[in-house]
């Protein structure tokens, strides 16, 4: 029934190009050799220069670091041109990129290394100490080689510091490398090597992003060149994007939202990327005006922050024609303000790491607010009973299950998780999203609740079981339960309710636990609030009743009328 509102000119079925992702950059270098592929900190990297750098790093990976077809290579960096070059080089040698959140701690990073089997990492220099803690030692598995880049190497010589406000970590000079496992990224660019072409299939593993789950152990999502391109090409068609589009890239590239919308999509189009290393709303306003940015994909919190700036009304933002995103609903008041003051419509969409981002979207001219949209090209989604998997009638709430070309091939080396995540019905393979939703009379999907226990912090998924598992390593903690706090800016924050061991009562404070947590897990996962309690409610079978605690927190929030996070 949703086809009644289908975007004009968009095919119902998706035809995925039978080529690897890097093919599009090679073609763009031939079509638009002098065109800016990436603008960063005042520097412009053309498509010809981009492909030359990709070839140089590919040759170095291949001939100096021994990376072969089928290997996995870690990529640990904030947004920068080197991230793009490294990503494309990894793919060009037939390997798969393992993008890692730069906020990851050494124990988290070690898990990614051991689970993926990666022995080589490309890492930004400010993150080098964390990576070095995960090098192979005394026969233990770990990183064998690290290719290290300094963000400042991508900046123009004689840069006017007043023209572009950049973080100190970006302008910092390249540091000498003393560890024997480390080699400089610039050294790879300058090496007199010739890349030896490798046959890369569309069905080869392309990227292995990790997503956590209810078990507490992150799982690698196996995306091939085909699944990544399916999401990418589908979004281009849906939103009428083209080679002359100019994209603002500020969402983190290690995350599928940023990787697909800020990097892969513009590169496959031969478009221009205006890249920010870190979010700064005042700088974003200037960049949109200066470079005539036309496309920006961002979570609602970032968009709200941007348009809350007084400068937004004082600069020419008329080039901005498409605002899109997901991860949380855009508040009605903000959507109305965007339409009335700026003539902009926020195109809400829905996707997951497991679907390479783009899955559902609202038609540009027939959207509904705070809505997941409709299934896009070649996507079939249903609402089912989460126990029986039987399809439910219109209007009833059930689990959203989906199938499409962009759905991952499965979880990396985790057949138990695959059995839980996939099922077949009517000869089709469906993925269980874990989200509870309903469908209205027009075929539009609306998120109602979560089947799985999950907290969303600034667009990042936090799985309570993972945080609880880490907290149990604290010597003073007897029991722990993680719940979500509502937060006006970040959506939610993490709260821990803990029972201390008798000997630690009065000796360990909530702040002690917060500080300890931040040393062992990414800052967005670490509890923002810790409450020490005498006991936690339990069921007859001895399980901690987390839902009861979560509901009590929500009632308290509603009663107080304030956000739960300080």
Image: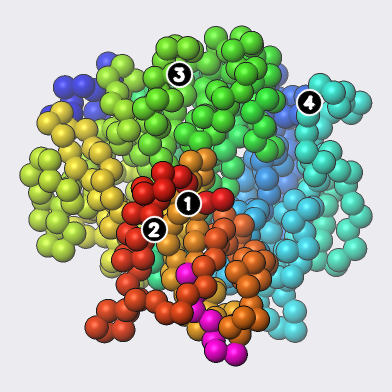
Residue contact at pointers 4 and 1, CB within 8 angstroms: no
Residue 466 in the image, given as x and y percentages of width and height: 48, 68
Residue 63 in the image, given as x and y percentages of width and height: 74, 56
> Counting residues from the N terminus, which is met first, the one under dot 2 or under dot 3?
3
Task: State which region is magenta.
Answer: 497-503
Q: Is residue 54 above or below residue 219?
A: above
Q: Magenta stretch containing residue 499, yes or no? A: yes
> Counting residues from the N terminus, which is met first, the one under dot 2 or under dot 1?
2
Residue contact at pointers 2 and 1, CB within 8 angstroms: yes
Cα separation between marks 2 and 4: 43 Å
Front residue (pair 258, 266): 258
Front residue (pair 288, 557): 557
Mark 3, Cα crowd under 10 Å, few <14 / some 14-19 / many 20+, is some
SS for tag 1? loop
Please identify the residue farthest to the front as the structure is shown.
560
- Going 47% across and 12% down the picture, which residue do you hit? 341
> Counting residues from the N terminus, which is met first, the one under dot 4 or under dot 3?
4
Mark 4 lies on residue:
164
Q: How is the image coloured?
A: rainbow
> Counting residues from the N terminus, which is met first, the one under dot 2 or under dot 4?
4
Mark 3 lies on residue:
338
Left/right placement of residue 19 relative to residue 439 reads right
């Amino acid at each position: 029934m949703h086809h009644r509102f289908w975007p004009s000119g968009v095919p119902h079925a998706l035809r995925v190009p039978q080529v690897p992702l890097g093919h599009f950059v090679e073609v763009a270098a031939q079509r638009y050799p002098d065109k800016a592929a990436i603008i960063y900190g005042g520097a412009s990297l053309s498509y010809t220069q981009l492909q030359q750098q990709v070839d140089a790093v590919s040759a170095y990976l291949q001939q100096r670091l021994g990376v072969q077809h089928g290997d996995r290579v870690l990529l640990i960096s904030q947004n920068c041109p080197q991230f793009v070059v490294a990503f494309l080089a990894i793919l060009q040698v037939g390997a798969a990129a393992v993008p890692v959140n730069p906020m990851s701690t050494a124990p988290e990073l070690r898990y990614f290394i051991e689970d993926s089997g990666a022995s080589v990492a490309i890492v930004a220099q400010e993150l080098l100490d964390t990576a070095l803690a995960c090098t192979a030692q005394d026969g233990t598995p770990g990183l064998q080689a690290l290719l290290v880049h300094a963000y400042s190497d991508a900046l123009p010589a004689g840069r006017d510091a007043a023209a572009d406000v950049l973080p100190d970590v970006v302008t910092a000079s390249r540091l000498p490398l003393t560890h024997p496992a480390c080699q400089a990224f610039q050294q790879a660019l300058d090496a007199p090597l010739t890349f030896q072409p490798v046959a890369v299939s569309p069905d080869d593993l392309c990227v292995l992003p990790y997503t956590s789950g209810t078990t507490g152990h992150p799982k690698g999502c196996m995306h091939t060149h085909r699944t990544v391109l399916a999401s990418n090409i589908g979004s281009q068609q849906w939103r009428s994007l083209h080679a002359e589009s100019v994209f603002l890239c500020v969402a983190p590239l290690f995350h599928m939202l940023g990787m697909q919308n800020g990097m892969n999509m513009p590169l496959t189009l031969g478009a221009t990327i205006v890249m920010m290393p870190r979010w700064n709303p005042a700088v974003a306003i200037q960049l949109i005006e200066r470079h005539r940015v036309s496309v920006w994909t961002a979570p609602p919190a970032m968009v709200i922050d941007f348009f809350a700036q007084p400068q937004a009304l004082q600069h020419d933002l008329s080039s901005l024609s498409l605002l899109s995103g997901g991860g949380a609903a855009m508040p009605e008041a903000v959507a109305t303000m965007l339409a009335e003051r700026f003539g902009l419509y926020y195109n809400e969409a829905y996707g997951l790491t497991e679907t390479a981002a783009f899955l559902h979207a609202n038609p540009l001219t027939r959207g509904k607010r705070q809505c997941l949209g409709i299934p896009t090209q070649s996507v079939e989604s249903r609402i089912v009973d989460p126990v029986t998997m039987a399809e439910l009638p219109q209007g009833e709430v059930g689990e959203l299950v989906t199938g499409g070309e962009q759905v991952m091939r499965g979880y990396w080396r985790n057949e138990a998780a695959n059995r839980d995540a996939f099922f077949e019905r009517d000869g089709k393979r469906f993925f269980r999203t874990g989200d509870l939703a309903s469908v209205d009379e027009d075929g539009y999907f609306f998120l109602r609740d979560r089947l799985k226990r999950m907290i969303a912090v600034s667009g990042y998924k936090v799985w309570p079981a993972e945080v609880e598992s880490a907290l149990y390593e604290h010597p003073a903690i007897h029991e722990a339960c993680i719940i979500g706090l509502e937060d006006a800016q970040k959506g939610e924050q993490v709260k821990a309710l803990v029972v201390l061991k008798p000997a630690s009562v009065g000796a360990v404070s909530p702040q002690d636990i917060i500080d300890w947590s931040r040393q062992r897990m990414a800052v967005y996962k670490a509890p923002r609030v810790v409450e020490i309690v005498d006991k936690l409610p339990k069921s007859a079978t001895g399980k901690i009743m987390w839902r009861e605690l979560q509901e009590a927190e929500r009632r308290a929030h509603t009663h107080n009328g304030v956000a739960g996070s300080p």
